Amino acid sequence: MAHGGIHEDDHAAFERPRKRSRPRTKERPSYDDAPIARVVTVDRGRYRCQTADGTHVTATRARVISRKGIIVGDSVKLDGDTTGHEGTLARIVEVEPRTTMLRRSADDADTFERPIVANADQLMIVTALADPPPRTGMIDRILVAAFDAGVAPILCLTKADLASPDELVNAYEPLGVPIVVTRPGMDLTHVLDILRDHRTVLVGHSGVGKSTLVNALVPGTGRATAQVSDLTGKGRHTSTSAMAIEMPQGGWIIDTPGVRSFGISHVRPESFVAAFPDLAELTADCPRGCKHTTDSIDCGLDKAVEEGRLDRSRLTSFRRMERAFS
């Protein structure tokens, strides 16, 4: 039937052209032989990667990977120009499965989790003994995040020339956490021994000396340092982005920007208890819903102390960290 001189069949001729002339294939390219590299820095959509032979390559991400799907420490597969020559650009096409992922939230009221670093097997909590003074609440929160992530924690006490480390050593030694103490200009062999052949992320409050420590451990790194403010007693954010640095002795250290808060809203108290197998075993006879805190009634941990199966100092240290959830 005609309408104004146009037949029905003529409408088909004016159909919007199809976007694709051929059906999209379901087969994706294989990157089995693509070179693998470690992401060492992330900056405004560019990823600095280091290949197995030490070549530094700048890369973008493939569209199939989400914008926040790549973080420092990730092991990735590269496509394109991986020579590392100036002006060249590779592309990250796959992210290898992560062994660990350290996360935090801005504070406990913030439910948004911020990935910090991937594939670390150690976490060094760096805290100054003075200037700025130590914050045990911050230490406890970072410890909780480390245990939750399955990353072995280490406590590094800096600026021992300004104050004694004894009080903090006595507070955290019962947890079995390795503790190292440093002062300016001292030999750092004992620290290097702990870091060798590991992937260790350094986390701490602003101004505690993380960047100074990194520069001493890996000379020539050039991480920026700054003094603590005389007015506020707080450090400034001298490192603005995380950086993974390969150590000549073997292993990696990942320096992170200083933090002024460390939220652990993503950690469930029950998963935290499970990070201590010896304590988790002692809670088997606790009443249903027991939170294992100081005011818990008939808690199995208190019973274990009374019977001599658990050292009281270890329970005290554990419960101090438990208070981080309140």
Image: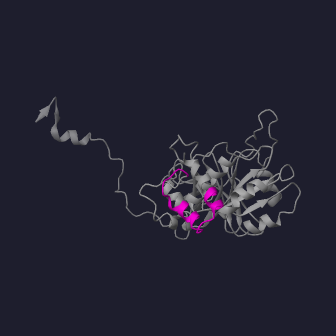
When the figure is inspected, residue 322 is found, relative to residue 29, above or below; the finding is above
When the figure is inspected, residue 130 is found, relative to residue 147, above or below; the finding is above
Give the residue at the far left of this rendering: 1
Q: Is residue 310 left or right of residue 231?
A: left
Give the residue at the far front of this rendering: 306
> Which quarter of the figure is the C terminus placed in?
top right
In this view of the protein, can residue 149 be seen by the observer? yes
Q: Is residue 18 left or right of residue 169?
A: left
Q: Residue at x 82, y 41 (%)?
A: 227
Dividing the picture into quadrants, the one containing residue 99 is bottom right
Where does the image place residue 53, in percent across and percent down from the top left?
70, 69
Q: Is residue 200 left or right of residue 285?
A: right
Q: Residue at x 75, y 64 (%)?
A: 247
> Which quarter of the figure is the N terminus placed in?
top left
Dividing the picture into quadrants, the one containing residue 123 is bottom right
Where does the image place residue 314, in percent across and percent down from the top left?
63, 61
Where does the image place residue 261, in percent across and percent down from the top left?
64, 43
Give the residue at the far top of this rendering: 4
Q: Residue at x 27, y 41 (%)?
A: 15
> For the magenta stretch, what is the residue range?
294-317
Task: Say which of 79 and 323 sits in front.
Answer: 323
